[in-house]
Image (cartoon, grey):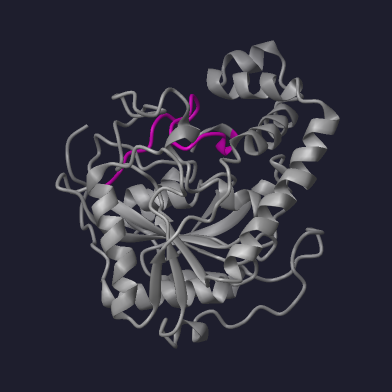
């Protein structure tokens, strides 16, 4: 994984690159790259990742596995992340049932984490039963933004979203109606990077990923008032907007990512459609770190090149069991593609 999980791909000056088992010429995304690749290869049932802007869901989508970012505080964290209230812990697994099992095991209070939920969590495995009949689902292919979505990804995710109609849910195409919160994200993110690197001197920084150092230097210039405004006012405004949205819709469905996996070792795809910033090809993941709501990425098919696509299900704050229940219904109706051995050449 990248240093401090700072970006959405899986390379690091310390550990090199992580490859995607579906095609080892591509990357599995990040930051939880190794967890996703190991899950795809069935190297264990449960793998743990961290998600500050999509770092569980991004590699889940690229590697064709299940990746859940639970409601913030449902899985306790210690030591706490420097990324403030953005960073969630979450499981990456091959099946929704394994994901629910993981939540049963690790979704418990811990007195060392003051933000950890103290209520008794439900039995997530038992909660997988019941299906989605009668649920109100919103399908948003771009979150209402001018996002270049790969045509194959667009077709696969749309078909997956509409498949919920066959399961008894209502599906309406509608956007949640919020502006891109990238500035909110980067204010908190860069300040967290600055804190993480605070003790690193010039010699240490010279050995680090230059992109991480640049983000930390950006964070050193963030004013205290701007940080508090992003952490409290802007974050609460978006959370309130989504709470109103979920009063109408039980779940929001989006593509997890607008593109399939791309060349390993790159921060962005080489064709330039997303510029040189990894956040530009992750526009559907980071808003829900800001709201702290549960979101899961599910495999929903393969492109013509044999690369996975991911469908994201987003629930209201605290509705992790509902997200998993809908995910289980989808998995039963649309069994996930599996991989038995790495594909491609280095």
Q: Residue at x 40, y 67 (%)?
A: 172
Residue 51 within the segment the image draws in magenta: no
From the top left corner, tell me how far across and down residue 222 is, in percent. 76, 25
Residue 14 within the segment the image draws in magenta: yes
Apparent side of residue 161 relative to residue 6 in the rendered image (left or right)? left
Q: Quadrant of the C terminus?
A: top left
Q: Residues in magenta?
A: 4-21
Secondary structure mostly seen in the magenta stretch: loop
Q: Nearer the viewer, residue 174 or 105?
A: 174
Q: Nearer the viewer, residue 112 or 274?
A: 274
Apparent side of residue 232 relative to residue 133 in the rendered image (left or right)? right
- Looking at this rendering, what residue extends furthest in the left direction? 304
Tell me if residue 103 comes above or below residue 51 in the rendering: below
Q: Quadrant of residue 228?
A: top right
Q: Nearer the viewer, residue 110 or 229?
A: 229
From the top left corner, tell me how far across and down residue 338 is, in percent. 24, 61
From the top left corner, tell me how far across and down residue 300 is, in percent. 29, 61
Give the total of numbered labels.
Answer: 0
Res 209 seen here: no
From the top left corner, tell me how far across and down residue 94 is, in percent. 36, 64
Res 297 seen here: yes
Q: Quadrant of residue 140?
A: bottom left
Q: Residue at x 61, y 71 (%)?
A: 247
Apparent side of residue 184 relative to residue 299 in the rendered image (left or right)? right
Tell me if residue 30 comes above or below residue 244 in the rendering: above
Q: Residue at x 20, y 49 (%)?
A: 303
Q: Residue at x 57, y 83 (%)?
A: 123
């Amino acid at each position: 994984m990248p240093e401090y999980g700072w970006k959405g791909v899986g390379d690091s000056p310390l550990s090199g690159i992580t490859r995607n088992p579906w095609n080892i010429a591509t990357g599995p995304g990040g930051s939880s790259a190794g967890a996703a690749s190991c899950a795809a290869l069935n190297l264990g049932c449960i793998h743990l990742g961290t998600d500050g802007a999509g770092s569980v869901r991004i590699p889940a989508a690229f590697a064709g596995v299940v990746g859940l970012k639970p409601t913030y505080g449902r899985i306790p964290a210690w030591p706490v992340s420097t990324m403030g209230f953005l960073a969630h812990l979450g499981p990456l697994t091959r099946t929704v049932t394994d994901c629910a099992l993981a939540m049963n095991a690790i979704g418990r209070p811990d007195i060392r984490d003051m933000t950890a939920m103290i209520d008794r969590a439900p039995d997530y495995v038992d909660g997988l039963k019941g299906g989605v009949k009668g649920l109100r689902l919103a399908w948003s292919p771009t979150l209402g933004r001018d996002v270049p979505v790969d045509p194959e990804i667009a077709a696969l995710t749309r078909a997956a979203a509409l498949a919920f109609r066959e399961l008894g849910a209502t599906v309406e195409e509608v956007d949640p109606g919020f502006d891109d919160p990238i500035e909110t994200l980067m204010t908190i993110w860069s300040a967290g990077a600055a804190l993480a690197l605070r003790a690193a001197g010039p010699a240490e920084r010279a050995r680090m990923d230059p992109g991480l150092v640049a983000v930390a230097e950006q964070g050193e210039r963030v004013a205290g008032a701007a940080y508090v405004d992003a952490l409290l006012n802007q974050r609460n405004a978006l959370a309130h907007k989504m709470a109103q949205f979920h009063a109408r819709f039980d779940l929001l469905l989006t593509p997890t990512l607008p593109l399939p996996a791309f060349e390993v070792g790159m921060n962005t795809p080489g064709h330039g459609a997303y510029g040189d910033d990894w956040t530009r090809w992750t526009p559907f993941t980071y808003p829900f770190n800001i709201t702290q709501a549960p979101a899961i990425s599910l495999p929903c098919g393969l492109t013509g090149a044999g690369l996975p696509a991911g469908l994201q299900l987003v629930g209201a704050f605290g509705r992790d069991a509902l997200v998993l229940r809908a995910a289980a219904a989808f998995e039963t109706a649309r069994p996930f593609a599996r991989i038995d051995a790495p594909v491609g050449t280095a």
